[in-house]
Amino acid sequence: MIKNRILSGVQPTGNLHLGNYLGAIKNFVALQQKFECYFMLADLHAITIFQDPQQLKNNVIETAAAFLACGIDPKKNIIFCQSAVPGHSELAWIFNCVARIGWLNRMTQFKEKAGSNKEKASVGLYSYPILMAADILLYKATHVPVGEDQKQHLELCRDIAIKFNNDFNCKDFFQLPEPVIVKEVARIMSLKDGKKKMSKSDDSEYSRINLTDTEDQIIQKIKKAKTDNDLIPSKVEDLNGRDEARNLIGILAILKNQTLEAALKDFSGKNFSEFKNILSDYLIKEIVPIGKKIKEFKKDPNNIKKILKDGAEKANIVSNQTLKDVHNILGLAL
Ligand code: TYM
């Protein structure tokens, strides 16, 4: 039995933002000490929505550079591109035959992403969580660090593992992976609307802090971030119904490594202008050095390509073994 193996992925679809960083990548960096880690650029997931091919290539380099800049060590961890390991697509097909349509119909992210025009969405966008299950189970990952938006997909992954093990009478062949979701950072919200999560696809640049933002951009975005006219309260309960305030205070608390209660104590009774200056300072301290490192790593794309190639070689070894076993279990390719 594998005890301590992580797999997680990030779609290479443009600038990473504070939500990706606090919700996932910062956690990857912390977990790399204790786990055997597979960190993946989910380019096959990215193409469920049309991607310009040249832009996709650039985004792969950009996202890998961000992994490195945030502190993921390529010597300790396996960093690779999903499309460089064909086993992901193959296992996804097999899981397409295990998962039930009713399970996919419950996925809220598909409903959000496809919007009102479901008939025109790609089939890939619909079966996206099946590919995610394949990503995780191909490596028999025990833990999957993600933001809360991915929780339902992980539940589906567990359902697929259970059904596969039952259908083919191979108890424990796929272990059930545990989600690793850090409550305080599970859902970083848009700076413009505290009910929407911070996202790459939001039209407004002012809704998010990108990892490549300059000091000035951070100051401007925080200055314009939506708040309300009330003073900062002293109790967490008093943030109920004040989504934007809760989000900003929550972000500062995380950056200061404090509880929400402690962060409120420092500012209770004050208005948001002083608070926003301090929040900007903390964001600048955390984010601007990462942005500078991203720029540095991007200067040497060959180094990044080499890291991804080495990672894919190692990932393919594990993937091939799992697929060989799956073929045996299913009676395929004798
Ligand atoms: P993606 O690329 O949308 O996001 C990457 C990671 O960032 C987290 N995240 C957030 N966390 C907190 N607040 C936010 N506003 C926020 N926005 C994004 C996401 O939860 C995610 O952890 N399907 C995945 C990629 C993937 C994957 C996998 C993940 C593909 N295969 C296998 C885990 C295991 C995705 O689209 O992430």
Image (cartoon, rainbow, N blue to C red):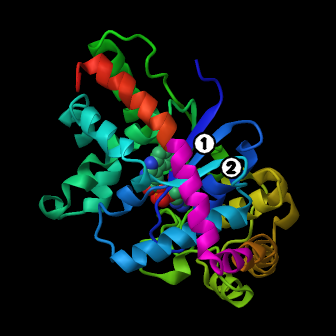
The mark that comes first in sequence, 2 or 1, is 2
Q: Position of residue 63 (x, y in %)?
A: 56, 67
Res 136 seen here: yes
Q: Which mark is residue 215?
A: none
* Residue under pointer 1: 181
* Residue 94 in which image quadrant: top left
Most extreme residue toward the front is 334
* Residue under pointer 2: 27
Q: Nearer the viewer, mark 2 or mark 1?
A: 2
Region in magenta: 293-315
Q: Mark 1: which secondary structure?
A: loop
Q: Residue at x 72, y 51 (%)?
A: 75
CA–CA distance in space, label 2 to label 1: 9 Å
Crowding at mark 1 (Cα within 10 Å: few <14, some 14-19, many 20+): many
* Residue 2 in which image quadrant: top right
Crowding at mark 2 (Cα within 10 Å: few <14, some 14-19, many 20+): some
Q: Residue at x 79, y 51 (%)?
A: 261
Q: Amino acid at mark 2?
A: Asn
Q: Mark 2: which secondary structure?
A: helix
Question: In this rendering, is residue 124 above or below 104?
Answer: below
Most extreme residue toward the left is 119
Would you say residue 302 sits in the magenta stretch? yes
Q: Is mark 2 within 8 Å of ligand 1?
A: no
Quadrant (top left, top right, bottom left, bottom right) of the C terminus: top left
Most extreme residue toward the right is 266
Q: Position of residue 183 (x, y in %)?
A: 64, 44
Q: Nearer the viewer, residue 128 or 244?
A: 128
Q: Amino acid at mark 1?
A: Ile
Q: Is residue 68 left or right of residue 143?
A: right
Q: Nearer the viewer, residue 328 or 176?
A: 328
Would you say residue 166 sits in the magenta stretch? no
Image label count? 2
